[in-house]
Image (cartoon, rainbow, N blue to C red):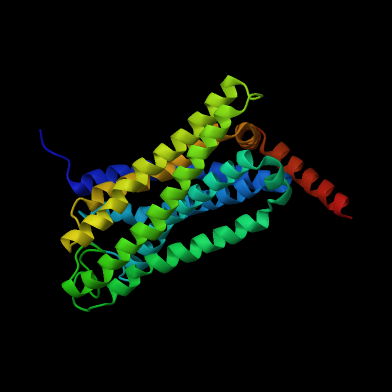
Amino acid sequence: MPSISSPQLSLAVYTVTFVTGLPLNLLAFCVFVVKARRRLLPADVLLLNLTVSDLVLLAFLPIRIAEASWEMKWKMPDFLCPLSGLLFFSSIYLTTLSLTGVSVDRYLSVAFPLRYKARRRPSYAMVAVALFWVAAFSHCSVVYVVQYQARGNDTAGNLTRCYATFTDHQLAVLLPVRLEMFLVLFCLPLGITAFCYTRFIIIIRSLPLVSLRRKRRAIGLVAATFLLFLVCFTPFNISHVVGYVENKSPEWRVYVLLLSTFNASLDPIIFYFSSSSFQKICLECLQATWEKLQLGRLCPGVWMEATENVATEDSQMVQ
């Protein structure tokens, strides 16, 4: 039985991720926008940022799909290689940092319910999100540094492969930065997340007034989120350590990167089961979209008239 090659597997995973992840994340984005209009909480800011980071990854995923369909040969303009790499890898670490922020918010909510509820502000979460973007982009900008370290090879000028083969001089710059990314952007968030969710579970189990059903639901949710964190991001980050020790970029890195990519399709599912309000608004958005599509398809004239009436009513309310 013939084995599946790296380009074939990458093409399959990237395609499935794009087809499933894009509509799910767009729906999640709409839900968080609706929630923000009603009442904006710090957790909503963090989850919205997580959705945006997934959408950034998905927006540039067609480039990866095209590259995989060309047997990992680069046939696009050279400038797209470092640009897509910067946004692609930055979105991965934005996801880990956002998941860490969510774990901190959940822990503080149960550990210090009254004090945290009185002091938590969406603006604090926005500052954290801004720091996440700075940390992710500043580290992943190494893609540009490596790209222009040397001319006339596969990573700069007349590209034949994008961010796949490196000279010794490029590895001397790239590998230490990857090791730092492993420590700062993965180990530190992982440690914080592990602490927060461990304490969350201990506190939830000790609460006498919370029903067993709600306890199991909350513990199951954080356990699934943490498991997702480990499975999707640990192998990719371990490749940084292995590459630093072996003084080369591991060939199997392309396979573990697929796990981190597929996470973009799994995040919205976690959102859906994490909150009953999210489920409610999600169903409302789907129902409203379906009704508009049906009305526009069956009675286009009625749909146009209804739209005009809504616009007129809105203008009268503003006046």
Residue 151, located in which quarter of the rendered image?
A: bottom left
Horizontal side of residue 124 vs 148, given as left or right? right
In the picture, the quarter occupied by the N terminus is top left
How far across and down, in percent of the image, does residue 265 sit? Answer: 43, 41
- Most foreground residue, 64 or 303: 64
Q: Is residue 79 something one can see in this rendering?
A: no
What's the residue at 50%, 32% (across, down)?
A: 221
How far across and down, in percent of the image, does residue 37 sit? Answer: 71, 48
Horizontal side of residue 271 vs 228, given as left or right? right
Residue lying farthest to the right in this orientation: 319
Residue lying farthest to the top in this orientation: 212
How many circles with numbers are drawn on the protein?
0
How far across and down, in percent of the image, does residue 255 sit? Answer: 24, 47
What's the residue at 26%, 64% (across, down)?
A: 163
Above or below for 212 versus 141 = above
Residue 138, located in which quarter of the rendered image?
A: bottom left
Above or below for 59 versus 287 = below
Q: Is residue 242 something one can see in this rendering?
A: yes
Horizontal side of residue 214 vs 299, given as left or right? left
How far across and down, in percent of the image, does residue 53 sit? Answer: 48, 54
In the picture, the quarter occupied by the C terminus is bottom right
What's the residue at 63%, 49% (across, down)?
A: 42
What's the residue at 49%, 47% (across, down)?
A: 99
